[in-house]
Amino acid sequence: MEHVAQHSDPHYDQEASKMGMWLFIFTELLLFGGLFIVYAIYRFMNPEAFQMAGKELNITIGAINTIILLVSSMTIAMSTSSLQKKNKGLTVLLLEITIILAVIFLINKYFEWGVKFDHGIWPGSEHLLNDLGKGEILFFGLYFVMTGLHALHIVVGLVIIVVALNKIQKGTVNADRPSLLENAGLYWHLVDLIWIFLFPLFYLIH
Amino acid sequence: METEKHHIVPYRVYVYILIALVVMTFMSIGITKINLGAYSVLGAMIFATVKSVLVLTWFMHLKFDQPLLRFMVGFVVLLFFAVIFITFLDYYFR
Amino acid sequence: MQTATHPSNEVSYLDYKGKYKGIFGWIFSTDHKRIGLLYMYSMLVMFVVGVGLGLAMKLELIAPGKTIMDPGTYNAVFTVHGVIMIFMIVIPGLPAVFGNFFLPIMIGAKDVSFPKLNLLSWYFYVAGALLVISSVLFGNGTPDTGWTFYAPYSFKSGTNLLPAIFGAFVLGFSSILTGLNFIVTIHRMRAPGMTWFKMPLFPWSLYGTAWIQLLATPVVGITLVLVALERIFNIGVFDPALGGDPILYQHLFWIYSHPAVYVMILPAMGAISEIIPTFSQKHIFGYRAIIASTLAIAFVGYFVWGHHMFTSGMSGTAQYTFSILTFIVAIPSAIKVFNWISTMHKGSINPEAPFLWAVSFIFVFMIGGFSGLVLGALAANVHVHDTAFVVAHFHFIVFGGVGFAFFGAIHYWFPKMFGRMYDKVWAKVGWAFFTVGFLTLYSPMFYLGMMGMPRRYYDYLPEFHAANILSSLGSWVMTFGLLIVVINLFRSAKNGPIAEMNPWNSKTLEWTVPSPPPLENFDEIPVYGEKDGPYEY
């Protein structure tokens, strides 16, 4: 791995762009890591309040969204295989499925947040500040920040996948230059990875 | 370029991984339904950890990448846990 | 292997005419050398502002009571001074300027791995700087929280904090992208035969730095986002009235901001490790020990953040742990000092300006380091916490460390960057004024702090008057030296005598290419043989 090859095309180094993407993923992990630290500390300080507040969240919607993300992770992982097998049609189809699943995830999230808003729960809402305890305020504050930031990452991932899809159709991303698709996949798995921890920490603490 | 980079993962492998992930999702929901007290958090976290390892090794191709990347991922995870540990030295003993 | 001479390699990077003309040839250029200079010039602009604010503070403190500004203005001045100097000068300082310019050349590459990302990170730098400036120019009141944005004041203060916080976030992004680029470049683009242990020490220090930039910056990024959300939406995360814990803010802030000190100092040490062997004409002493200490500083430095919070109300266990870890991080720093001194021993020393800056770096770094041990010791810390002693300590490390190393580096690499030599006599005169002024400016603060003068006050008790006058005098002498240095370099970049390819008889790769280097640095990628090494004198 230390013998750096001089490639025929000096401006294309697949291994370098993969490493760059991984390093970027590390920064994302620590970005969320900061929030997980905040969560861990406040949960440690307010264990009962976090359990009570967690009951407000709908496990079914959470589980559905988990499965949607897992399936979409599989489809985008498959698309990297099909690109290498030079099956362009299947690659495009798999990416389109991924995009549709991501949109469904966001729609679910929209309704989930909407229900919270209907119950008078949003950051700084009167119901939250006046009727609920400090632990609940923290729980819902973190809930909105962490799922919101996660949803933002879904949107970003969606944009990257659309760009990758576009370039696959044009042929500039192909079996010989798959970096953009691979990196889009890595990013999408990161989004999945974070949700794998968000789901039990917010929805399953009864 | 190294040949292993062109390793193509068969589709069925991804399907197996997905099935495992979905099963574990339901198991982690199930385990929190049982009242295990403080251990239910632990249970859910163990499932989440196993799931993330699956995603990292198969979906994110770490199994087929150069060992350097695996080392880096491990290092970052350890670093993060060290930071949490040290932060808790304050909160746990306060 | 690329062998053919690229047509664009016939002219230097300064004269190269690309697709764009004039200033666009610079701000759209993905050439790592031009990006390095872009950073340098934009940093110079911010540095002038920062120095001006610093001088204003010293003028205010020349006499007790109000001299030139009221307390509110003083708070704003030290806040903006801190934000500019920390986020825009010392953190990008050596990596963004000399790292960008010399990292690829020193490892025998034509550019960094992601040239476009490199340019993007400069755009982020400019955007962040503009955001911070906009918080000064617009809105009701300049931020007055100090550069640390401590909660809960940072979301209670009525001043225009949001742009400043967002600006710091964007500057962090710039820093992350630079670090990411450097790590990949070092892994993937080293010249054939240049193994890890044949790489010069400046790239090694950049490697350690890059990891800190990558792994620490996101934590402060999310923390600043939380403060911004707290201001806008009342999410309660750091607000004690809503259940939050302000001390947690301090934890998260220093999880980044202490490692950030090593982002500043490691490349400085790397530059010193290049200068000392060159001007001693001797192999660096303990090459591997320096590498090991670089990585050890980067790693242990990640776990010492709590020594900024000894008086905040942490648990005793955490205090002891952070104190012992702080002492441990002093060991690798000391190893480096021993190595530099041993390199000079029995070398043929050539006391040119870069060497003088390097030696004075070691001197001020030692003072800063030892005073750091005073602060790392729990009992002593409680006595001098938040006093002028702390201000003196971190100016010795941050300004002394980065400033002296930066000026050493620019005097060392100047002939390569601009193809001309500066006036060596004026360079030494500037160094002398700067060093004397620096010591006069900051040394009295150690005394003032131990006597009990708190930091961040525009006023003080009459018994502190004499030492404060001395300190203010020092600020003028230092600025005079700074002016000499800058004017000398600017004049020489235009009119200095043409420099040789390798004026210092140095052995690293950047001295094997023409001065100034052509667009793609090397006609032919150099190959390191079995016996080659960066310091084989």
Image: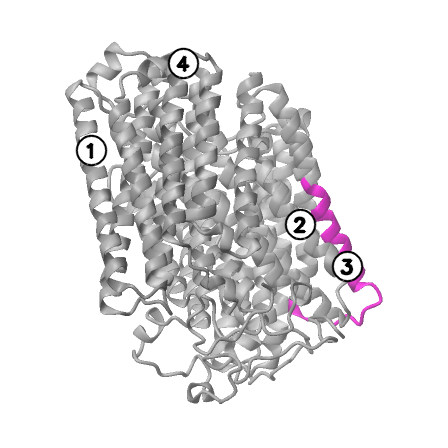
Across the whole image, how many numbered discs are drawn on residues? 4
Left or right: where does residue B6 sit relative to residue C408? left
Q: What separation in Å lies between label 3 and label 4 (alpha carbons)?
A: 60 Å
Q: Nearer the viewer, residue C407 or A87?
A: A87
Disc 4 target residue: B34
Q: Position of residue A123 (x, y in %)?
A: 25, 25
Residue occupying the point 29% across, 63% down: A87
Q: CA distance from mark 4 to mark 1?
A: 27 Å
Mark 4 — on which chain does it sit?
Answer: B
SS at mark 1 in the image: helix
Disc 2 crowd rating (10 Å Cα; few below 14, some 14-19, many 20+) is: many
Task: Give the residues drawn in magenta, as a range.
Answer: C329-354
Q: Are marks 3 and 2 in contact (CB under 8 Å)?
A: no
**Residue C101 horizontal side relative to residue C532, left or right:** left
> Distance of mark 2 from mark 1, alpha carbons?
57 Å
Q: Look at 73% across and 58% down and name the residue there.
A: C288
Instruction: Name the residue type under label 3.
Output: Gly
